[in-house]
Image: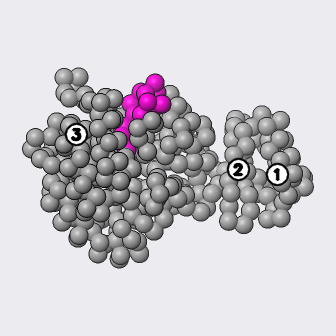
Amino acid sequence: MIIVMEARASKSEIRSVLEKIKELGYTPHTIHGKTRKVIGAIGDERGKFVLQSLESLPGVERVVPILKPYKLASKEVKPERTVIRIAPGVTVGDRQLLIIAGPCSVESEQQMVDTARAVKAAGAHVLRGGAFKPRTSPYAFQGLAEKGLKILRAAGDKAGMPVVTEVMNPIDVELIADYSDILQVGARNVQNFALLKRIGKSKRPILLKRGMMTTITEFLMSAEYCMSEGSRQVILCERGIRTFEDATRNTLDLSAVPVLRERTHLPVIVDPSHGTGHAAYVAPMSYAAVAAGADGLLIEVHPRPEKALSDGPQSLTFEKFREMMQMLSGFVSAAGRTV
Ligand code: PEP
Ligand code: MN
C-alpha cells in the first residue's frame, strides 16, 4: 500500500503513521517526493486491507494499493526518476549519460592504468574491471581476486575515476565495498537472492545486470530484493538475453529500455558488449541504446583485445572506443542529453 501524506502533514503526524504501519506488521519506507512524503507499507500482501484504516489518521490524504508485484522499484511509489550520485560530479539517472568503460577482467597494473587513462581521455566517467569472474568453465581465468581489487582501485584513483567491479558471493560484499564505488551483480547472479539481500544492505550503489533468462518483471523483482533491504541506489543494466539467434552472443533487448523507464524510477543503462559479443556491433548498439532512452552505457575496452584473458572478441581497442565516443555525441544531443 502507498500512504500519500498531505503536503502540509507535520513531522509528528508522519511519525505516528510510521508507528502504526509497524504495529500492523508492515515495514514503512518513506519516499521523499517534490511536494509531499509518500510512505510505502511493504509486507505480506494477504492482509494488506488492514492498512486502509490509516486513511483516518491526521495528515493522511489517501491510502492506495500498489498494483505491481515490485513496490519500491515501481513508478507507482515514486514517480520522479531516481538520480544516483556515484562520486563528486558523476551521477546517473539525470540528463548526463553515464559511461562506464574498462576491460572485462583486471589482468595487470599496466593494463588498468593504461585503460583508465585512455577511457577517461575519451570521455568515460567510471572505470570497470572484474576481479572475481563468473566463468562458464572452472578452468578459465577466474580473476585476480583481492589483488585485482587493489589494482582497479589504484588505477581509478590515479585517473580520478570511480570504479565498479562484480561481487559474486555474499561473504565478499564488505571486502569489495572497501575498494569499489559501485557493486555489480552479474547476469548469472540476478536471482541469487542471498546475494541481493546482502548487497541491498550496503551503502554502495548497485549495478544490477539483467539475467539472460529473466523477464523484465523478474528483473524488477530482483531490484526489489535489494531495495527491500534498504538500498535506494540500484542501477539496472540490460545486457542481452538468450534467444534462438546465434549471430550475436546474446540478443540485446533494447525494448527493455522504454519498458523499464515506464515501470520504474531507477536508472537504466545498456551493455552492448555482452549484449552482442562482437566489437563490431558495440558502437551501433550504443547509439541505438541512447536513442531508446538509456541513462548510460557499459563498454568493455582492452589495450589489446586479442590478448585479453576474458571477453576479447567483444572488447574495443582504445582507438575504437575513442571513435565511438566521438560519434556518440550526436546521438546524445539528439536524445536531449549530455555526455
Ligand atoms: C561482465 O560485466 O564482465 C559480466 C560478466 O557481465 P554479465 O554478468 O552481464 O555476463
Ligand atoms: Mn565480460
Can residue 70 be seen by looking at this rendering? yes
- Determine whether the beta carbon of the residue marked 2 sits less than 8 angstroms from the nearest atom of ligand 1: no
- For the point 36% across and 68% down, the residue is 339
* Disc nearer the start of the sequence (2/3): 2
- Tag 1's secondary structure? helix
* Disc nearer the start of the sequence (1/3): 1
Q: Which mark is residue 109?
A: 3
Does 216 appear above or below 132? Answer: below
Which amino acid type is shown beneath numbered disc 3?
A: Glu
- For the point 13% across and 46% down, the residue is 305
**Nearer to us in this view, 231 or 68:** 231
Disc 2 crowd rating (10 Å Cα; few below 14, some 14-19, many 20+) is some
- For the point 24% across and 54% down, the residue is 117
Asked if residue 169 lies in the magenta stretch, the reply is: yes
Q: Position of residue 313 (x, y in %)?
A: 14, 46
* Distance from the alpha carbon under mark 1 to that under mark 3: 52 Å
- Specify the segment rendered in magenta: 164-176
Asked if residue 149 lies in the magenta stretch, the reply is: no
Does 255 appear above or below 147? Answer: below
* Disc nearer the start of the sequence (1/2): 1
Per the image, the residue denoted by label 1 is 14
